[in-house]
Image (cartoon, rainbow, N blue to C red):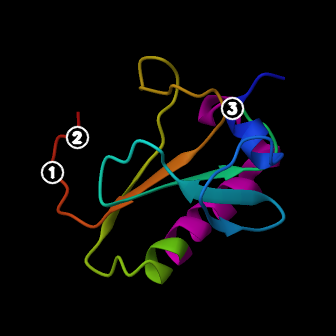
Amino acid sequence: MDCLFCKIVAGEIPAKLVHQEETLLAFADIHPQAPTHVLVLPRRHLGSLAEAGKQDRELLGRLLEAVAEIASRLGLSGGYRTVINTGADGGQTVEHLHLHLLGGRPMHWPPG
């Protein structure tokens, strides 16, 4: 498989790890869009949120819990934004489900 994030999970490509556990990994985005920009993703390849099924409910819940835990640990007490881009029209550029955790500055609406 030629998935960038699978290669990071496998340790083939280095990343600045922020959090890791059995089912997920979090690392700093190499092109940050905010002072804090962390990507949180399942270790298992899952192409996008659109591909998730009932069997992924626990994993999806854990990803969201991890975002909140990481945000707290990184001191984002003033708030943060969580983004999941899905598909080309949604802005997804790597076909591996991942959540963006953005913080460290005020966010504006609409986002894009």
* Residue topped by disc 2: 111
Where does the image place residue 92, in percent across and percent down from the top left? Answer: 49, 27
Tell whether 8 sits left or right of 87.
right
Where does the image place residue 12, in percent across and percent down from the top left? Answer: 80, 41
Tell whether 107 sits left or right of 19.
left
* Residue topped by disc 3: 4
In the structure shown, which secondary structural element does the residue marked by tag 3 occupy? helix
In the structure shown, which secondary structural element does the residue marked by tag 2 occupy? loop
- Which residue is more in the foreground, 104 or 77? 104
The amino acid type of the residue labelled 3 equals Leu
The residue sitting at 21% across, 64% down in the picture is 105
Extent of the magenta region: 47-69
For the N terminus, the image quarter is top right
Where does the image place residue 103, in percent across and percent down from the top left? Answer: 32, 63
**Main secondary-structure element of the magenta-colored stretch:** helix
Tell whether 14 sits left or right of 111.
right
The residue sitting at 49% across, 82% down in the picture is 73
* Residue topped by disc 1: 108
The residue sitting at 63% across, 52% down in the picture is 15
The amino acid type of the residue labelled 1 equals His
Q: Quadrant of residue 72?
A: bottom left
